[in-house]
Amino acid sequence: MCFICSIGLTLVPFLHKNATVSERNRFSCSGNSLTTLHSNYFMSGLKRNAIVIGITGGIACGKSEVGRILEEMAFSVCDADCVAHALMDKGSAVFRKVVDHFGEQILTEEGEISRPVLGKIVFEDPQQLEQLNALVHPAVRAVLSKWIEEMRARGKPSAILLPLLYESGMQNLKWDAVVCVSSPENDVFQRLEKRGLSPEEAEMRVRSQMPLAEKESRSDYVLPNIGTLGELKLAVRKTVDAIMQER
């Protein structure tokens, strides 16, 4: 699922970045011990305190699922990967730069950039990945910066799914908080296998990003995705509430 930039709270455990490893490992939710607040009260709080959250994390850790949950909470959600793909549409300035560098071998019969072909090139060669990011990220940053300004002007709570938030240097965008979605490595590789990647391809994708532990340490909040979907929903709402409280 791809989120395009567009324009009752339940309290559950979440982890601040200073939580210990043992605290993270003990993260769990029990529906019998949760306190539920009226949803109208929660949404009125969002309206009074419109926030902009950066959602980062490792590959296959659950960022898209967190985005869907935030949309259910009336957030506007923008997926930076979708922005990057749109910016590489046939005929665009970024498209021409990418094709000039990588050659027409990356094009489909219809003249569009083949994401599988380009992905194979860059994930097998760190220098090529760095070059691709250098061609695409400045344009992505410009779009995201403008979108953040528009959301703030409208008083709209919003979030951007940005896997390479730190790698791209976008940690200094105007965030109210950065949240890192985290999952155990075994779960990550199982999800990548379900996406059709071989173990070797999955390994290359994971290792091409900043280590997850470093992203966790640099983020304001860590959101462990290690339980059920219901538990994740509750944890997202608790994290949003904490961000609002700190504003």
Image: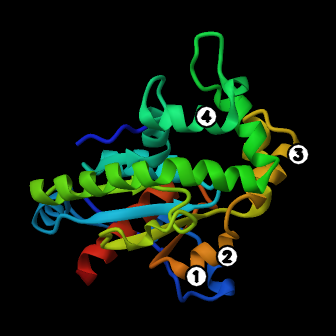
Task: Point out the tag, 2 or 3, that comes first from the N-terminus.
Answer: 3
Number of marks present in the image shown: 4
Spatial CA span between label 1 and label 4: 38 Å
Closest to the observer, 137 or 55: 137
Q: Quadrant of the C terminus?
A: bottom left
Q: Are marks 1 and 2 in contact (CB under 8 Å)?
A: yes
The disc at residue 56 is none
Contact between marks 2 and 4 (CB within 8 A): the answer is no
Could you say which disc has been placed on residue 217 in the image?
Answer: 1
Question: Which residue is drawn at the image coordinates 66% and 56% (left, top)?
Answer: 130
Q: Which residue is mark 3?
A: 199
Amino acid type assigned to the residue bearing label 1 in the image? Ser
Residue 100 numbered tag: 4
Using a 10 Å C-alpha cutoff, classify the residue at mark 4 as few (fewer than 14 neighbours), some (14 to 19) or many (20 or more). few
Q: Is residue 191 left or right of residue 216?
A: right
Task: State if disc 3 and disc 4 touch (CB < 8 Å).
Answer: no
- Residue contact at pointers 2 and 3, CB within 8 angstroms: no
Nearest to viewer (mark 2 / mark 4): 4
Comparing marks 4 and 3, which lies closer to the viewer?
4
Q: Which mark is residue 213?
A: 2
- CA gap between label 1 and label 3 equals 27 Å
Q: Residue at point 25% right, 53% down?
A: 146
Establish if 193 lies above or below 55. above
Q: Which three-letter amino acid code belongs to the residue tagged 3?
A: Pro
Q: Position of residue 84 (x, y in %)?
A: 48, 42
What residue is rendered at 40% in x and 63% in y? 54
